[in-house]
Amino acid sequence: MKKLFVVLFVFAAVIAAVLSGCQDGTGPEAPVPETATPTFTITDTPTITPTFTITETITVTPTITETATFTVTETPVLGCVMFGNYMDYSTCSLGLNFTATVFQKFSGVEADTATRIMLMKCDDGNVEVAIYSDNGGCPDTRLATTGVVNLSGDLGWVSLDIPDTALPAGDYWIAIDSVCACIDMDSPGTILAFNGAGMPATMPTCSHDWTASWKMLVYAACD
């Protein structure tokens, strides 16, 4: 008990002394803080410039102007052309003298009404031109004829009237019985020649005297 009292007395004396020093400035000095050295990190932040591409699709709608399509020809076409050879010849480039009736075949004819036959004249004299039907690749029935016509005067295209003749689509023959016929050597075709045949209402045979791969300058026309 005596020892406890002594300890408490000493502790109280120490506390009193500390408090006394604080009041008169003689107590323990406050610790001086150390000089603080700041620590920092410099971060270099780059400037970012965005790069981008703008893609623009431009659609141009053209303006379409309709242009008329037409064919210029020097051939004096009377009415529409049904079938035949109507090349741009103003005069006959080659005329052949025949002693036969020559038949020229034309395939794939469209339906229409023939009103005349145009013929390239190469000599004066009598001529007859006719249209025949086709029967298995041979001239068959006479459908229209100009009759015998006497030609004279200037050479070139002449118009020979025939009765209006309605022709359905198909193959046909144009026959010429004349002293002369104009030939287009550059246009291949089928010619059958019958010596002395004339222009019968029906061809009795397909047995011809000779053949050639030319085209005569003749065509059927319509109004």
Image (spheres, rainbow, N blue to C red):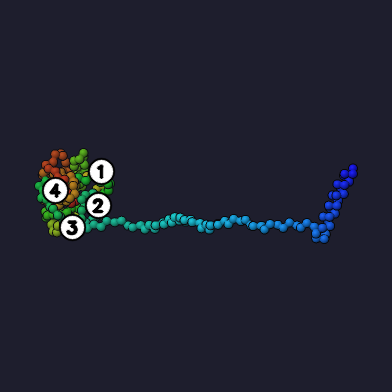
Secondary structure found at label 1? strand
Do labels 2 and 4 touch, CB within 8 Å? no
**Front one among 55 and 206:** 55
* Vertical comparison of 214 with 74: above or below: above
What's the residue type where badge 1 is placed?
Gly
Q: SS for tag 3? A: loop
* Location of mark 3 (residue): 90
**Residue denoted by label 4:** 177
Q: Earlier in the sequence, mark 4 or mark 1?
A: 1
Marked residue nearer the N-terminal end (2 or 4)? 2
The mark that comes first in sequence, 1 or 3, is 3
Q: Residue at x 11, y 44 (%)?
A: 195
Q: Position of residue 76 (x, y in %)?
A: 22, 57
Residue type indicated by callout 3: Ser
Compared across the picture, whether 95 is left or right of 82 comes to left
Residue drawn at point x = 13 percent, y = 59 percent: 153
Q: Which mark is residue 170?
A: 1
Nearer mark to the viewer, of 4 and 1: 1
Q: Which mark is residue 81?
A: 2
Name the residue furthest bottom: 24
Instruction: Let me know if residue 25 appears in the view.
Output: yes
Residue toward you, 76 or 189: 189
On the image, the x and y values in percent for residue 174 come to 19, 47
Name the mark nearer the viewer: 2 or 4: 2
